[in-house]
Image (cartoon, rainbow, N blue to C red):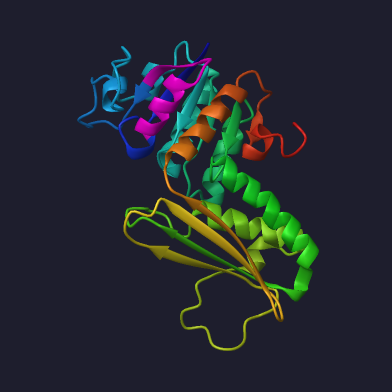
Amino acid sequence: MTKVVVTGAAGRMGTQIVRLVRATPGLAVSGAVERAGSPAIGKDAGTLAGGEPLGVAVVDDLAKALPGADVVIDFTSHEASVRHAQACAAAGVALVIGSTGFTPDAKAKVAEAARKVPVVLSPNMSVGVNVVFELVRQAARVLGDAYDVEIVEIHHKHKRDAPSGTAVALGEVAAQALGRAPADALAYSRHGILGERPPWQIGIQTLRGGDVVGEHTVFFCGEGERVEITHRATSREQFARGAARAAAWLPGKAPGVYDMADVLGLRGAK
């Protein structure tokens, strides 16, 4: 039985993850963590997730939940995820990170922790989205420079980072498939920019509103036709399901940074 600690256990994603982990054969919730001062501290994680009690009380410090754990699932913030990665590295516990908004410095700190423990770091845990990554890669290779690439994403009004990590990852996938450096190719909105669209550019547009779980569309705009690849999330459950799948896959792997393509077998194992 793989013992799983869930951080942000009382949040929108955390409660979904607790439910999915307890329903997944071979996985068990062994710990639950929330920020200091949260009203969830001391409460049962199973009850907070809308189910039967698990006998697992929510604590305010990840270090308290790590003894005996096999893997941590972390959907918090990139700042908290860095601290959690460092704690997992010190304790020898594997880590699945679904947080977004990572800066290059934060990613480097996670990579440093991954020298000691295996880490799955993915901007989107959805199985469908990770298939879309591969579809975009293939489309970009086949369609080539004759097609302009644009990305539009929309999420609920409470999402804190913009653009989404998934939108950036889609742009990076397309840029790399086209032989372009993502840092040069990606353009975020175009307010105040005059002149024609540079042919090498990949635009990313962000919308926020309502309760939209998440939608991403990649446009390949050519002369006389347009190809669109869209993923629409209608429930957060699919993110939790992917995280549970990653948690079942990760323990026992060599230290290093993995992503959902590794988990799903979309590329050769590291």
User: Residue 143 versus residue 92: which sits nearer the camera?
Assistant: 143
Asked if residue 20 is among those painted magenta in the image, a careful observer would answer: yes
Left or right? Give the position of 110 relative to 33.
Answer: right
Residue 157 visible from this viewpoint? yes
In the rendered image, residue 152, in percent from the top left (x then y), is placed at 52, 65
Q: How many marks?
A: 0
Asked if residue 242 is among those painted magenta in the image, a careful observer would answer: no
In the rendered image, residue 188, in percent from the top left (x then y), is placed at 52, 69
**Looking at the image, is 86 positioned above or below residue 100?**
above
In the rendered image, residue 142, in percent from the top left (x then y), is placed at 79, 63
Q: Quadrant of residue 120?
A: top right
Left or right? Give the position of 42 relative to 61.
Answer: left
Q: Quadrant of residue 168?
A: bottom right
At a point 70% along the width and 74% down the height, the residue shown is 200
At a point 35% along the width and 26% down the height, the residue shown is 33
Please, which residue is most extreme toward the left here? 39
Residue 259 visible from this viewpoint? no
**Looking at the image, is 85 positioned above or below residue 44?**
below
User: Which image quarter is the C terminus in?
Assistant: top right
**Looking at the image, is 193 positioned above or below residue 102?**
below
User: Residue 135 versus residue 166: which sits nearer the camera?
Assistant: 135
At a point 69% along the width and 50% down the height, the residue shown is 134
User: Residue 96 versus residue 265: which sits nearer the camera?
Assistant: 265
Q: Quadrant of residue 140?
A: bottom right
In the rendered image, residue 119, in percent from the top left (x then y), is placed at 59, 31
Please, which residue is most extreme toward the bottom here? 195
The stretch of residues the image draws in magenta is: 14-31
At a point 20% along the width and 30% down the height, the residue shown is 39
